[in-house]
Amino acid sequence: MSKTILGVTGTALAVCLVLDSPAMAGPADNSLVWAGPKEVAAVETYYDTSREAVILSQHVYDGLIYWDEENEEFLPLLATSFRQLDPVTWEFDLRDDVTFHDGSTFGPEDVIYTFTFVTGDDSGILNSSDVRWFKSAEQTGEHTVTLTLTEPFPALLSNLALVLPILPDGHYDAAEEGADGQKRYAAVPPNGTGPYTVADFAQGETVTMVKNPDYFADGPKGQPEIDTLVYRTIADSSTQVAELMTGGVDWIWGLGNDQTAGLSGAPGITTLNAPTMRISYITFDIKGTSGTNVFTDAAVRQAIGYAVNRERIATYLMGENSVVVNAACHPVQFGCTADVATYAYDPDKARAQLAEAGYPDGFSVEFYGYRDRPVTEAIMDDLAKVGITANLRWMKYAALRDLIVKGEVPIANMTWGSNSIPDVSAITSYFFGGGSDDPANDPEVQAAIREGDSAADPDARLAAYEQALRRIAEEAYWIPLFTYTKNYAFNETLEFVPTADEIPKFFASSWKQ
């Protein structure tokens, strides 16, 4: 199918107007400026998996389907309908009235290109595990595409909705080659079909988006009401607060409880604490490759579980909506179970177990972290009470994750948001299914996960995942800690409703009249 390139569109005109005008925050010009600490490398999830990139992608791009969290159902988005033909075959009827931001028409060839490219050996996408199910895509009707899977993958719809945006045919063909000979795919200008189009991208600083006037109003995202969205990178939370107070930004999140309490009485500001799909956990070097073999002993890992006062940390550092978790998953995800071994706070038992394992006087260890330093330091304080001296090594996530994969980190406090996917395949399968991030490589766990990932019967999936999660808890391969909450603060005239998937839907927000 050939692609039609239109002339200057209303979107292009809007982009020009925005670039000729200074960005302003607030309802006066129907714009919204939001801030976060991350420097965004791309506005889609293939070459930037940060939370900010996930959010931007949902505004600039569309997937085949949409996850309606409120009603817990999958709805057609770029598809008009979809159906499963057999355990490994899905068919999607596509909209015929959609254009990309450059004016080119959307069609089956774009879907085929997207999945063929991102699963190619040279694509280098960061979320390759999200498309591990893909075998082939083919056009089977004028506006119909069939996706064939390598094996049954019941979480397919979640991935299609949340982390697999559709790109135009040939999107990365013009990617420039760097000095190392590698294509710079992340630098290709964004071009989606979403409710907002990118007007300006100052990498590491701002992303400016304007409303797409040609966006289809009858889809689940609807026509946006706010004309301009601007994301600003502001690393320091105190600076974020100051900008909010002075009107430089309209919306911030991720504040500490003390900061949120200080803002709660400020005139013109609304503050909220809401649950998310992120959990905190402790992971170990189970194989003994980091220079110490102390955590090869399950008794020591279990002692860590008894040593950490998870409920206290959750209550005082996360907020009222945080809950303690015992399984290696988020409680709202399909397949997660609470019926696993638990490690209630018991420092006496932790000390006794350490003594039995040969460490009556405790030990010293390098303890790694990357996010929410007060949480990591609270864990370290609890460990000190049972004789474990934890020497903090604070790093950025990407560097720390690489060291963990290499087996060079003895113990770390990590977090995972599952890309907002409401299925344990996005966390338990990811970390214990035998991939590079699997700290245990337990054949029993991996077999159960394979069964859960591929079974068509929901009850069979639940049973298989429960088996895997029980084994993970019994062996203390992880010590899950608690669910994250998010503190929000924003202009009180903004109509905004937070959701647990940690994807603020600014396309559904508006300014109060």
Image: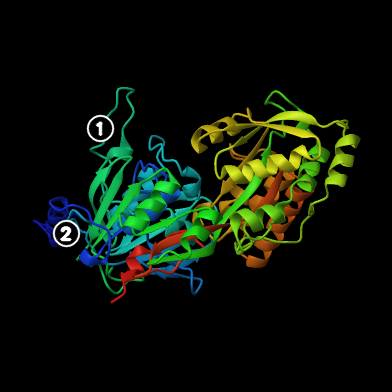
Q: Quadrant of residue 75?
A: bottom left
Residue 383 located left or right of residue 10: right
Q: Identify which amino acid the numbered label 1 is placed on.
A: Glu
Measured as percent of width and height from the top left, residue 229 is found at 28, 58
Outermost residue to the left:
7
Measured as percent of width and height from the top left, residue 440 is found at 70, 39
Residue topped by disc 2: 11
Q: Identify which amino acid the numbered label 2 is placed on.
A: Thr
Residue at 79% from the left image edge and 40% from the top image edge: 385
Residue at 27% from the left image edge and 72% from the top image edge: 217
Depth check, mark 2 against mark 1: the one in front is 2
Q: How is the image coloured?
A: rainbow
> Is residue 219 among the parts visible in the rendering?
yes
Looking at the picture, tell me which residue is in the foreground, 492 or 323.
Answer: 492
Residue 341 located left or right of residue 400: right
Residue at 51% from the left image edge and 32% from the top image edge: 399
Measured as percent of width and height from the top left, residue 97 is found at 23, 67
SS of the residue under disc 1: loop
Q: Quadrant of residue 118?
A: top left
Looking at the picture, tell me which residue is in the foreground, 275 or 151.
Answer: 275
Residue topped by disc 1: 176
SS of the residue under disc 2: helix
